[in-house]
Amino acid sequence: MRLDKNIPTQKKIKETLHKIPVEYFKWGTHPDHFMIDMPHRHEFVEFLFFTKGGGFHEIDFMGHNIEQHAIHIIPASTVHFLKRDKTSDGFTIAFDKRFLDTNTIHRIVYPLENEPFVINLSKKQFEYIISIVNVILMQVELNEGYYKEKGFLLAMELLINAIAQEIQHNPTLDEKQDRIVSAFKSCLQSNIHKDTSVKFYADALNISAKYLSNHLKEVTNKSAKQWILESLIISVKKQLINTDFTIKQIAYHHGYNESSLSKLFKKHVGYTMTEYRSNKNMSF
């Protein structure tokens, strides 16, 4: 505990675009953000792209060999440090995900879980991701204005969702060996708007609700209820942002009455559904 309190935290992030807290930096340039060879953490998310491998990356006190064509996702407040070999190379995109769904230009519902992830990709998969990054960098070079920022955020959304897609197809070792976790996630993605009970998903997998929840907790460190709640909130956020459905219609679509869903949303998001949709009273 004493060690954790003494771990340095980087709080500020450079604004690449006016009022958009997103930063790109190439390793080995000045200032080199990756000369830090001690455990530290950030109050923002980092995507690390390794164009050349070598060395290791300790994330949440677990070591990972650095492979070529890898992407490491580091959520805010995650303790990590990077020991790159001199031959390794890459770059980082850092951003504050709270901004993504509170900006008024193009709001983005962040689809990734709040846990670190290491993805080792094929050359073709990695090059596709990099092509999206290049679109982001080209947007930075455009003249200032609404369409520059709009295009930048659209490209950021494409990048984040492309990485989320790769994560879905690159489960952790435990999950890769576990058909129950894989089947549950697939079933959850297809049916979150139909049912939010643990029993529904347990029945679909032909196991008991208790066994499903205990098993998920053991393998993923999250219970079935936690998985379902997080998926529900993301689904509701997407409809609030991307559709003109009334709150009553959104609640009905997810099997809730308006009052129940509104209370649940306010409890776990911190804002009412109306505030979230309009950005009213939301602070960043």
Image (cartoon, rainbow, N blue to C red):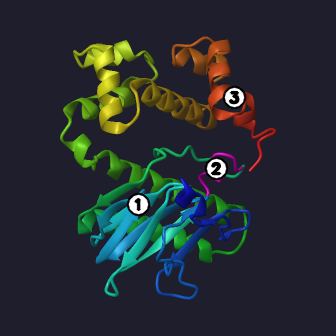
C-alpha gap between disc 2 and disc 3: 16 Å
- Classify 247 as above or below 148: above
- Tag 1: residue type? Ile
Q: Which residue is mark 1?
A: 59
> Outermost residue, front direction?
2
C-alpha gap between disc 2 and disc 1: 22 Å
Range of the magenta residues? 95-103
**172 or 93: nearer the viewer:** 172
Q: Are marks 2 and 3 in contact (CB under 8 Å)?
A: no
- Observer-side mark, 2 or 1, equals 1
> Outermost residue, right direction?
281
Closer to the chain start, of discs 2 and 3, is 2
Does residue 257 show up? yes
Q: Position of residue 173 (x, y in %)?
A: 23, 48
- Classify 63 as above or below 114: below
Judged from the image, the secondary structure of the residue bearing numbered disc 2 is helix
**16 or 35: nearer the viewer:** 35
Q: Which residue is mark 2?
A: 98
- Classify 283 as above or below 66: above
- Tag 2: residue type? Arg
Q: Position of residue 83 (x, y in %)?
A: 38, 76
**56 or 171: nearer the viewer:** 56
Q: Which residue is mark 3?
A: 273
Q: Is residue 96 magenta?
A: yes
Q: Position of residue 284 (x, y in %)?
A: 74, 50
